Amino acid sequence: MRAGAHGAARQAACASVLQRAREAGLEQVGGSVELSHQSRDAFKRMSNSSGEVTRVVQNIANAISMENDNEHAIQSHVEQVSMLIEQNDRSMQEVVNSANRLKAVSSALNQDIARFRL
């Protein structure tokens, strides 16, 4: 009976070792599954963050484009104002020239009138 008891004890010990090995394996599989879920969630967060970065970059690009358009419009207006100033300068020079001619005509008329008064 001793041999039978020894065999039963050995079988029970093996069963116990196998049970512990299964439990350890299940724990490792469970840990792996948890890590897999954590990895999946991390990738989802990265994907969402990547989408947000893309939206922010697009908003910046749109703002820069609008700023460039505004700069071109301002430059065009500055050029128009510059041309108007140049036209105004020419007109003012013409007014000065006309005033000088009018002054000369006025002086000539005053001289002619002064001759008739004598």
Image: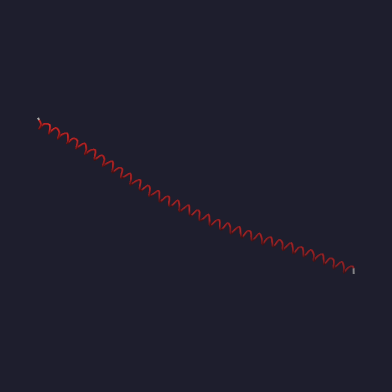
Q: Quadrant of residue 102?
A: top left
Q: Quadrant of residue 104?
A: top left
Q: Residue 110: x, y in percent?
A: 15, 33
Colour scheme employed for the rendering of this structure: secondary structure
In the rendered image of this protein, does residue 20 appear above or below residue 93?
below
Q: Residue 69: x, y in percent?
A: 40, 51
Q: Work out which quarter of the rendered image holds the C terminus and state it.
A: top left
Residue at image position (74%, 63%) is: 23
Residue at image position (22%, 38%) is: 99
> Looking at the image, which residue sits at the far right?
1
> Looking at the image, which residue sits at the far top?
118
Q: Residue 113: x, y in percent?
A: 12, 33
Q: Is residue 89 left or right of residue 41?
A: left
In the rendered image of this protein, does residue 48 appear above or below residue 91?
below
In the rendered image of this protein, does residue 38 appear above or below residue 116?
below
Q: Quadrant of residue 86?
A: top left
Q: Nearer the viewer, residue 114 or 24?
A: 114
Looking at the rendered structure, the number of numbered marks drawn on it comes to 0
Q: Work out which quarter of the rendered image holds the N terminus and state it.
A: bottom right
Q: Is residue 107 left or right of residue 76?
A: left
Q: Is residue 118 left or right of residue 8?
A: left
Q: Is residue 112 left or right of residue 7?
A: left
Residue at image position (24%, 40%) is: 95
Q: Residue 51: x, y in percent?
A: 53, 57
In the rendered image of this protein, does residue 100 appear above or below residue 18?
above
Residue at image position (35%, 47%) is: 77
